[in-house]
Image (spheres, helix red, strand yellow):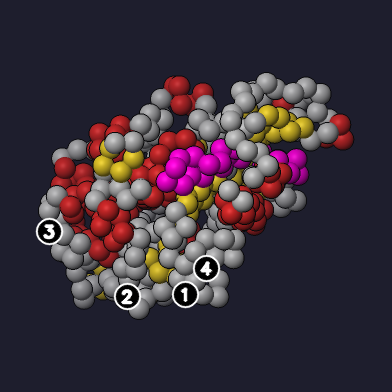
Amino acid sequence: MQNMDRRVFLARGGLIAAGAALGTTALRPVAAHARDTGRFGAIDAALGEAVANRNVLGVAAMAATPDGIVYDGAFGDANVATGAPMRNDTVFWLLSMTKAFTATAAMQLVEQGRIRLDQPAAEILPELAAPKVLTGFDGAGQPILRPAKRPITVRHLLTHTSGYTYSVWSDALTRYEKATGMADIATSQNAAFTAPLEFEPGERWQYGISMDWVGKLVEQVTDQSLEVYFRENIFEPLGMKDSGFLIGSAQKRRLATFANRQPDGDLKPAPFEMPQRPEFFSGGGGAFSTPRDYLNFLQMLLNGGSFNGARLLKPETVAQMMTNQIGDLNVRQMRSAQPAYSNSFDQFPGQPHKWGLSFDINTEPGINGRAAGSISWAGLLNCYFWLDPASRVTGALFTQILPFYDERVVALYGAFERGLYRGLRRA
């Protein structure tokens, strides 16, 4: 039997088999973990069913409260070629879940007085001194640019109000890349930083490459690469031994299989790796990590900046990161310009939501359990996290699928959240 056709789900506390109808012929052994499976049985069932229905090839989910990890589930295959099981130390490309690391690094420098949120970013990065705004295209299809009227501040970059966008969700920038041959930010080529603004700094919120600029800012101030700075100031203090930008042989052997969703709904495995000889380390989306490592990071934020004796940020800094930093502006729906990479998405349709440093903030209670004032974000390959400071809980779900905001994974993320809050209420 082909490994990718086996439907055995590995969960804390034991094994769940999909049944003879799915062709399961053997159970893989897995170490038992002490947990009250009854409290979170609904999560186990939802994640297991998602693998059985081939909504995901494999999935891992973890959650924590201030008392520690309360849920740790891994289902399906991490590697469909070898049949290696999904685990909480399986390695995932984080893509935009990297941004939380970069924001943490920037706020460490703010605490140290080495940067100021409202200072012009060009004081640190001279290449930001004269940004141009894209106003349209001429009859020959060439871009029309004008000088920006306002300086870009560090706060603009941290809040996606700088004017920089992503081509994945911008018809104008997609057209600009084609007209000029400019490299996309995902290539990790410095030429991507020649991108124009699409609006005046501070005029509106729109998701984009701003956090890659913040990564360069951190490197300039510290005279260290992000690879080194993150390792010394975030990963090592938090015990995140499987996180970084340059993936080692040991991590590569535990890498989760990436897959593309097909028009018929099936998943087609394909190779995927972030550039390993990059011209810059992408503070906006270049890192890898594991569920276990990432939960250490989220627990640090949940605990007001400290975890297992290591303090990375002051409590007041973490609180600031989780509050509205864009005033009367609102987070906008992101309309896809490149459907192969992302669907259009809005985490909280029908309600205003804000942006912190650097997180989405729901201003009303979420439909799946989180309280108003929770923070969240995601990665392009359908990894998701949220942190609820009112209920004192955080959780994350990991897959490796394109396009982003896959409706089946989003539904699974919602089931995980609902099951978690219901289980916690039973405690």
Label 2 environment density (alpha carbons within 10 Å; few <14, some 14–19, many ≥20): few
Q: Give the mark, 3 or 1, whose residue is nearer the N terminus.
A: 3
In three-dimensional space, the C-alpha distance between marks 3 and 2, rounded to whole angstroms, equals 24 Å
Q: Is residue 297 left or right of residue 155?
A: right
Q: Residue furthest right?
A: 21
Label 4 environment density (alpha carbons within 10 Å; few <14, some 14–19, many ≥20): some
Residue 365: mark: 4
Residue, disc 2: 327
Residue, disc 3: 123
Q: Are marks 4 and 3 in contact (CB under 8 Å)?
A: no
In three-dimensional space, the C-alpha distance between marks 2 and 1, rounded to whole angstroms, equals 12 Å
Q: Quadrant of residue 143?
A: bottom left
Mark 2 secondary-structure assignment: loop
Q: Nearer the viewer, residue 360 or 402?
A: 360
Start-end of magenta stretch: 48-74
In three-dimensional space, the C-alpha distance between marks 2 and 4, rounded to whole angstroms, equals 20 Å
Closer to us: mark 4 or mark 3? 4
Q: Give the mark, 4 or 3, whose residue is nearer the N terminus.
A: 3
Q: Residue at x 71, y 30 (%)?
A: 15
Mark 4 secondary-structure assignment: loop
In three-dimensional space, the C-alpha distance between marks 4 and 1, rounded to whole angstroms, equals 11 Å
